[in-house]
Image (cartoon, rainbow, N blue to C red):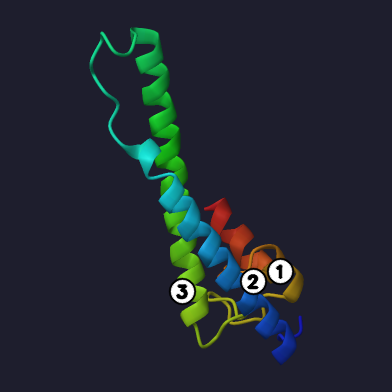
Amino acid sequence: MDSLTPDQEAELRADLRVLEAQLRALLELSAEGARPVELDQAAVGRVSRIDAIQQQQMNRAGRERARARLAQVRAALASDGYGECRRCDDPIGFARLKARPEAPFCVGCAGALEQR
């Protein structure tokens, strides 16, 4: 696979900056939903409270995924070897990086790591 051209790398780094801004905005917007659920039975019924707790847990899981992805985006932006697989040092490929610009591994290495 060929290494990225300077134009491709510039395009992907721009994609990373947009993704970083989107993830930061998502984390800001979802902060309210991560707050503890009120325990006042008079204000919230039992079933509604259970539903609220479930929503809160889903929100927290989504925030954790967003935080992890944001960390990968920031690592990719800071990387001098952007576009090279961290495991085998082969080029990752423009199409893969266009779909997931923060991808640290080529398709082969990512598949091998997922099988473990």
Residue 2 lies left or right of residue 10; in this view the side is right
The residue most toward the bottom is 6
Q: Residues within 10 Å of mark 2 (few under 14, many from 20)?
A: some
Residue 110 rendering spot, x and y as whole percentages:
60, 62
Q: State the CA–CA distance, disc 3 to disc 2.
A: 14 Å
The residue most toward the left is 40
Q: Secondary structure at mark 2?
A: helix
Q: Residues within 10 Å of mark 1 (few under 14, many from 20)?
A: some
Q: Which residue is mark 2?
A: 15
Q: Which residue is mark 1?
A: 98
Q: Which residue is mark 3?
A: 75
Judging depth in this view, the residue of 1 and 68 nearest the camera is: 68
Closer mark to the observer between disc 1 and disc 2: 2
- Which residue is painted at 74% across and 75% down in the image? 94
Closer mark to the observer between disc 3 and disc 2: 2
Q: Secondary structure at mark 1?
A: helix
The N terminus lies in which quarter of the figure? bottom right
Q: How many marks?
A: 3
Residue 95 lies left or right of residue 38; in this view the side is right
Mark closest to the chain's N terminus, 3 or 2: 2
Look at label 3 and name its amino acid.
Ala
Residue 77 rendering spot, x and y as whole percentages:
51, 78
